[in-house]
Image (cartoon, grey):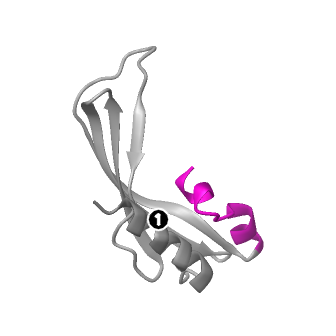
Amino acid sequence: EMVRDAGISQLDMKAAGLVFAVRRVEADYLKPANYDDELVVETRLDTLKGASFDMPQRVLRGQEVLLEARIKVVILNTHGRAARLPADIRAKVTAIAASDSP
């Protein structure tokens, strides 16, 4: 959702030979969720590098934090190798990170 809201089309990226891929997830499960709980997932963006970025994430039930995670996303080319983020997409990702800053 965050990527789409920033105007980044993953279909356009794929047509250009690039994809986002999850490289690593570190998650702390703090409390269980229950069926029918209304949950909110908060995702921020930080630590933007040439071919990757980190996304801290929290899952909340009301004000109660159920999960805290850190996700590393990499950009891959059609050969499965790391690729630099194109300038236009980098600008959009940077704008997301700036809007999420406190």
User: Magenta: predominant secondary structure element?
Assistant: helix
Say which quarter of the image contains residue 101.
bottom left
Which residue has dot 1 on it?
96
Of residue 2 and residue 80, the one placed in the foreground of this image is 2
In the image, residue 79 above or below residue 43: below
Q: From where the camera sits, is residue 84 visible? A: yes
Residue 80 appearing in the image:
no
- Residue 34 falls left or right of residue 82: left
| Percent position of residue 46, x then y | 35, 67
Q: Is residue 99 above or below residue 68?
A: below
User: Tag 1, which secondary structure?
Assistant: helix
Magenta residues, start to end:
1-15
Residue at figure coordinates x 46%, y 74% from the top left: 94
Name above or below for residue 3 compared with residue 92. Answer: above
Q: Is residue 11 magenta?
A: yes
Residue 16 inside the magenta-drawn segment: no
Q: Quadrant of residue 39?
A: top left
- Residue 33 in percent (x, y) is at 34, 22
Nearest the eye: 90 or 24: 90
Crowding near the residue tagged with mark 1, few <14, some 14–19, many ≥20 C-alpha atoms within 10 Å: some
Residue at the limit of the structure toward the right, as seen here: 15
Q: Residue at x 58, y 62 (%)?
A: 6
- Residue 102 spot, x, y in % from top left: 28, 60
Q: Is residue 26 left or right of residue 55?
A: left
Residue at (74%, 68%) from the top-left corner? 12
Residue 13 at x, y percent in the picture:
69, 70
Amino acid type of disc 1? Ile
